[in-house]
Amino acid sequence: QVQLVESGGGLVQAGGSLRPSCAASGSGRALSNYRLGWFRRAPGQKRDFVAGISWSDSRTYYADSVQGRFTISRDNAKNTVYLQMNSLKPEDTATYYCAAGTRWIIGTTTAVDYWGAGTAVTVSS
């Protein structure tokens, strides 16, 4: 069992930056065995993929809407994954969820084993 706890959301003006983090804890396989990533859900919308990072070579993947503005990274020693969000836009307003899975198909919700409770991000215009 793995617990994922997000933090670092908040309110920011358009053009600003935030860096949410996701701390993993629990017994079982080391975090380095998991593919990690972020999804978001805007009010009234479905949950969408934002970014993902592989465990073997730290290859990163991004949704087109955030490519070039967001950067995902991981620190296996700290069991933490980060999402650096720059040049934020009002349409980035959403609750951001951390996800983990050993066989997660990055870009989809397929084979996500664990979800965090989410952290809210609000971007004002």
Image (tube, rainbow, N blue to C red):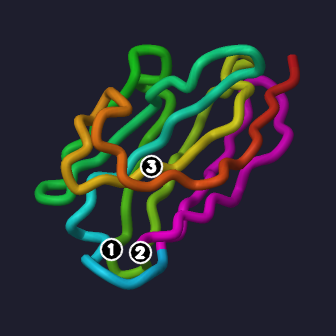
Quadrant containing the C terminus in the rendered view = top right
Foreground of the two, 53 or 17: 53
Q: Are marks 2 and 1 in contact (CB under 8 Å)?
A: yes
Q: Which residues are magenta?
A: 1-24
Foreground of the two, 113 or 81: 113
Which amino acid does the dot numbered 1 rest on? Asn
Mark 2: few/some/many CA within 10 Å (<14, 14-19, 20+): some
**Of the residues under marks 3 and 2, which one precedes in the sequence?**
2
Which amino acid does the dot numbered 3 rest on? Ala
Q: Real-space Cα distance between discs 3 and 1? A: 15 Å
Residue at 27% of width from left, 35% of height from top?
Answer: 106
* Nearer the camera: disc 3 or disc 2: 3
Seen in the picture, residue 17 relative to 55 is either above or below; the reply is above
Quadrant containing the N terminus in the rendered view = bottom left
Quarter residue 17 falls in: top right
The spot of residue 91 in percent (x, y) is: 70, 15
Mark 1: few/some/many CA within 10 Å (<14, 14-19, 20+): some
Foreground of the two, 113 or 35: 113
Q: Is residue 18 magenta?
A: yes
Seen in the picture, residue 16 relative to 22 is either above or below; the reply is above
Residue at 37% of width from left, 32% of height from top?
Answer: 109
The disc label shown at residue 79, or none? 2
Residue on which the image places disc 3? 99
Residue on which the image places disc 1? 76
Q: Real-space Cα distance between discs 2 and 1? A: 5 Å
